[in-house]
Amino acid sequence: MSNTIKKDTVSFGKSRQPKLIFALLAGAAASMTAVNICSGSIPLSLPEVWSILTSPNDTTESIIVWKIRLPRALAGVLCGGLLAVSGLLLQVYFRNPVVGPFILGISSGASLMVSLVMLTSLTMQLSIMSPFVTTLAAIIGAYSVMAIVVAIASKVKSGVTLLIVGLMMGYLCHAATSVLIALAEKEQVKGFVLWQLGSFSGFKWNEIYLLIGVGGLLMVAVFLLAKPLNAILLGEEYALSMGINIRLLRMLILFCACAMAGMITAMAGPVAFIGLAVPHMARMIFSTSDNRILIPGTLLMGALVASGCDFIARSLLSPVELPLSAITAFFGAPIVISLLMKKKVQL
Amino acid sequence: MMFSKTQANKAVLTCRDLMVGYKNTPVLNNINLSFEAGQFTTLLGPNGAGKTTLLRTLSRHLESLSGTIHVDDRPLAELRQAELARIMAVVLTDKVTPPLFNVFQFVALGRYPHTDFLGRLTEKDREVVSHSLAAVHAENLSHREFASLSDGERQKVLVARALAQEPQILLLDEPTAHLDLKHRVEVMAILRNLCRSKGITVIASLHDVDIAAKVSDRVALVKDGAITDWGYPEEILTTETVAELYDFNSACFSHHLCSIELRGDGHRGKVFVVAGMGSGATIYRMLAKRGYAISTGVLQSNDLDCFVADSLGADCFQQQPSASMTEASLQQAYAGLAECDLVIDTGFNSDGPYQNNLNLLKKAVTDGKTVFSLRDDNRAWAIDGNNSNIIAVKNTSHLLDAMEAIQ
């Protein structure tokens, strides 16, 4: 009997060699980024890109890489990863496998606030601070919707109700947004509509720095929450009995999830399904619910999937660029449906 | 590592004038209980009586409305959450959405209050997890996915998870609900063993009065907004208290047999059963189930049949144990016999004190009543000549068929 116990202790935590999968995912995400930088209307080879990256010059190629392709590729990686982690947090928090920042109306709340900033003349005076203002607005929007959803969710326990509440919040925000659009000037509407389709193009470097800085801090915070996130998988009652400060944990989870989703929505527009589908893919690949593995896993997986979707969006019907949210939906919705059909949706 | 006697008799959890409930609706009042180390206490009571509310207050999931709770002489409210988690663990009724964990990993979640900020397991943690699994006889499940477990296995693993916290106090809300008989008995045996060998104080709410009576060191009866009774199950769980606790009408808890008997409504008329020495018990139950009222006798008052018949609400003619049935008690039984149309001979041993009961059968035959006999050889009491109203049956099912046939 002591033998079997020994074996258990040895094998614990080694389901499917996570290190190997991490390496594969990181490799795949890096390759996808490289492909994104190399491909386009002016194809570049890897050595060309390398020489441009190491010694920037004034050639058209260099400007394309430094001003357009590199920010866009990095935006895909960062937004995808953070959005997916935000979805993971929400799924664990609600103990519901079919929620995500988009489904719960968080993205819509962020959109509404962004539209308020973009469509009214508020931005006129503040155009220099633009990424920060819209980001802040988006986070506030995300957080307000989240607060309402949470308040309702605490009254009604059923998971389906939660989804419906999220959808309704989404409709309300869309309705308010459309009123703002009707009242806005034509010029502003054009930019807003493009933004609303979701895209990683047009990222400025200060936005990338913001993503790396704030996103990095949030990721550290999320990773430090991995242990209580695991405990809360059993439900809040059990988590409480294991010594967790539930109120603080709730606040932290929601703060991190909304900050991530809000910030990304402000910059890239509402991107659907990444936050919902990617955590499931990570769970399936790592075959564990251990958030210490899932958090970095989801980050890499989200980076890979978002970069892939962006590649498809700009190359499928090139030179026409497809809306990013359309691609992520084409790809994400079937995955979620098949997951539900197989009843493989677990946390 | 046996739990030493010196540690016993020390209250690890005490409630004084405790009032529990939700917001402004008190559910239970004036609770004064103390739970000693290594003691198994069961909360019994009907659904909605407040057992869960009390447990949730003890585990600090709910705030108490008034009064105090002390853990090891310290007020419960003053303990830090993490501190409490190392003293007290719970097994709840909530369905756990199974995460993608194997059983070992699942149980390891219980190490939460003991591990570092990333929840990494040390050698000692792994050992505790293994021991917790061993304590619930689930070592063999260690590699299985938690989601693939049956209800019974899941419950054992949930207990193991609680044990991994290394608690002094274990609170369980209906730990045997939804379990099959094997697991029900197994889980109770495990819990009992935890009290004995590890000195853990177990407080559980249960629905099985019979199992509770056999397992618990103390029982607390919860009803009508109060703890109506508290103490040794052997003293407290009498037929009357149990009937009152659950508002029994058609059932009866037998104090001596420690089981529940279901009474019939007797709509199909009265049957007289001549039994003795345990030969009648199963036949009484079968008759009660089929809706017959029962009359039986003459039984010695220490006979198993006597306890079962009492619990089933039968008219039971009995006498103090003696060498043979007295004429006086037979006379009473004759009167009972006269009210019945059908008579059953259970095939009781007629060599000893029950010999005179054969006279009841003879009387029944002479009075022209239909007599079913389970006896191999009923010449012992048959009367020469007119025996056409005796129906020999081989076993109880045959008896039932025969009874159905003539009605």
Image (cartoon, rainbow, N blue to C red):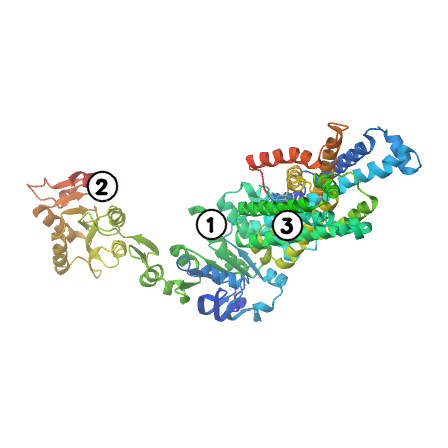
Label 3 crowd bin: few (<14), some (14–19), many (20+), radius 10 Å: many
Foreground mark, 1 or 2, reads 2
Chain ID of residue with mark 3? A
Q: What's under tag 1, amino acid-wise?
A: Glu
Q: Helix, strand, or loop for circle 3?
A: helix
The answer to which of A23 and A329 lies nearer the viewer is A329
- Give the labeled residue for mark 2: B400
In the picture of the structure, the residue carrying the numbered disc 1 is B186
Chain to which the residue tagged by mark 2 belongs: B
Do marks 2 and 3 share a chain?
no
Q: CA distance from mark 1 to mark 2?
A: 35 Å
How far, Cα to Cα, is label 2 from label 3? 59 Å
Instruction: Looking at the picture, tell me which residue is in the foreground, B114 or A65.
Output: A65
Q: Chain of mark 1?
A: B
Res. B20 in view: yes
* Amino acid tagged 2: Leu
Callout 1 secondary element: helix
Between B373 and B36, the residue placed more toward the observer is: B36
Q: Quadrant of residue A278?
A: top right
Q: How dense is the environment of label 2, judged by Cα within 10 Å: few (below 14), some, or many (20 and up)? A: some
**Label pair 2/3, CB-CB below 8 angstroms:** no
Mark earlier in primary sequence (1, 2):
1
